[in-house]
Image (cartoon, helix red, strand yellow):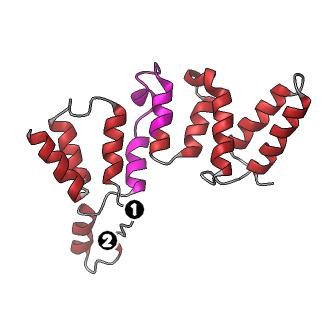
């Protein structure tokens, strides 16, 4: 019962520290990684501007950093401090890590994981189609070193001997994802 009150207080305050205490003091409160990630995501304050930048004295700056709102970069940094195996149950459920990356708005990193990690070998074609979808909806920016463009290009190359017309379509999309 007190864990529910703590969760509500953490959400209302948008406090990352309260959420950390909740997960430490009640380890079974979040039965799945998705539940934990959605809870953390609700703490993110989109319109938060760091008060540290406007604080006058070093003491005020330190105080405002301690009370700073939980932002998307904070959320992403917390996720990125652990390896894929941490989220995917030791590689047994590789799509869990991809879902975590997508929940934290790291689309390019999710595509890279699906396209390159040995545990996700059977999802290579999904990485290609995610990359196309994310590029189309501007969730990833076109650039030359893009793993997304590389994935689409490699997939097109595999299609050359089976369906040249389809391969050409994928080559065109790869060029677009590269930035034209």
Residue 74 lies within the magenta run: yes
- The residue closer to the viewer here, 116 or 103, is 103
Q: Is 140 left or right of 10, judged from the image as shown?
A: right
Residue shown at the point (71%, 53%) measured from the top left: 143
Q: Which residue is at a point 35% across and 32% down the rendered structure image?
A: 33
User: Is residue 112 left or right of 94 when viewed as pictured?
Assistant: right
- State whether residue 175 is above or below residue 60: above
For label 2, the crowd category at 10 Å Cα-Cα, with few meaning under 14, some 14 to 19 and many 20 or more, is some
> Would you say residue 136 sits in the magenta stretch?
no
* Residue 136 % position (x, y): 68, 50
Q: Mark 2 sits on what residue?
A: 52
Q: Secondary structure at mark 1?
A: loop
Instruction: Residue 129: name its quadrant.
Output: top right
Say what secondary structure mark 2 lies in.
Answer: helix
Marker disc for residue 55: none
Segment tinted magenta in the rendering:
72-100
Q: Which residue is mark 1?
A: 46
**Quadrant of the image for the C terminus?**
bottom right
Residue 69 place in picture, x, y as percent = 30, 61
Q: On the image, which quarter does residue 25 sit in?
A: top left
* Disc nearer the start of the sequence (1/2): 1
Asked if 116 appears above or below 5 in the picture, the reply is above
Residue at the (73%, 43%) spot, across then down: 149
CA neighbours of label 1 inside 10 A, class few (<14), some (14 to 19), many (20+): few
Number of marks drawn: 2
Give percent across and percent down for residue 56. Answer: 28, 81
């Amino acid at each position: 019962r007190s864990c529910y009150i703590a969760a509500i207080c953490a959400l209302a305050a948008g406090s990352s520290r309260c959420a950390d205490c909740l997960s430490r003091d009640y380890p079974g409160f979040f039965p799945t990684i998705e539940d934990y990630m959605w809870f953390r995501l609700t703490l993110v304050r989109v319109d938060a501007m760091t008060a540290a930048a406007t604080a006058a004295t070093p003491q005020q700056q330190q105080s405002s950093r301690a009370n700073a709102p939980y932002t998307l970069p904070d959320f992403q940094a917390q996720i990125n401090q652990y390896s894929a195996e941490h989220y995917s149950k030791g590689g047994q459920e590789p799509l869990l890590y991809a879902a975590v990356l997508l929940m934290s708005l790291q689309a390019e990193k999710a595509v890279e994981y699906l396209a390159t990690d040995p545990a996700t070998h059977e999802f290579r074609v999904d990485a290609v189609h995610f990359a196309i979808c994310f590029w189309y909806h501007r969730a990833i920016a076109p650039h030359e070193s893009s793993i997304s463009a590389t994935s689409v290009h490699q997939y097109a190359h595999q299609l050359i001997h089976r369906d040249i017309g389809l391969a050409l379509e994928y080559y065109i999309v790869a060029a677009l994802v590269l930035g034209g």
